[in-house]
Image (cartoon, grey):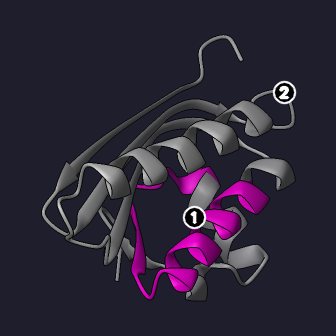
Amino acid sequence: MSGTRIDGARDGDRLLITLCGSLDAMSVEALQSQLYDLARVHDLIGFGVPVRQIHIDVAGVDFCDAAGLRMLVAARRVAEARQATCHLHGPQPHLRWLLRATRADGLFAISGPEGR
């Protein structure tokens, strides 16, 4: 998973996640585990405030294949199971294309350049 990074922070009912690097078959398993751990830890330290919004900053993602897309869709399912919304911020043109081509763009609130 060299060069791929995930960071997270909590702001009220929002879980803020930043992804950087490649979202591919080599990195996705470790990233999914970290994403799950982040959500769980932030639930535990959330002082009774449930996560209602998951914001994923993908501006630093320089490559995403089908495995990476599956991970993003899985994050959206995690949000849905928590009755939370899932937002993608700043996807690069290659990720916007992949989201549109697979019709996964309708699963997320997308913001940033060219965002809705």
| Quadrant hosting residue 88 | bottom left
Query: From this viewpoint, is residue 78 visible?
Result: yes
**Residue at 59% in and 64% down:** 75
Closer to us: 10 or 87: 10
Q: Neighbour class for label 2 at 10 Å: few (<14), some, many (≥20)? A: some
Place of residue 112 in the rendered image (x, y in percent of width and height, measured from the top left): 29, 63
**Residue at 58% in and 37% down:** 34
Q: Is residue 33 left or right of residue 96?
A: right
Place of residue 83 in the rendered image (x, y in percent of width and height, measured from the top left): 44, 88
What is the quadrant of the N terminus in the image?
A: top right
Q: Is residue 22 above or below residue 38?
A: above
The residue tagged 1 is: 96
| Quadrant hosting residue 110 | bottom left
Spatial distance from mark 2 to mark 1, Cα to Cα? 21 Å
> What are the residue bounds of the magenta stretch?
69-94
The residue tagged 2 is: 26
| Quadrant hosting residue 100 | bottom right
The amino acid pointed to by label 1 is Arg
Q: Is residue 92 left or right of residue 107?
A: left
Place of residue 52 in the rendered image (x, y in percent of width and height, measured from the top left): 31, 78
Sequence-wise, the earlier of marks 2 and 1 is: 2
Q: Is residue 38 above or below residue 5?
A: below
Closer to us: 1 or 12: 12
Q: Is residue 70 left or right of residue 82?
A: right
Place of residue 17 in the rendered image (x, y in percent of width and height, measured from the top left): 38, 47
Query: From this viewpoint, is residue 63 visible?
Result: no
What is the quadrant of the C terminus in the image?
A: bottom left
Q: Are marks 2 and 1 in contact (CB under 8 Å)?
A: no
Residue 97 shown in magenta: no
Q: Is residue 69 above or below residue 34?
A: below
Closer to us: 68 or 48: 48
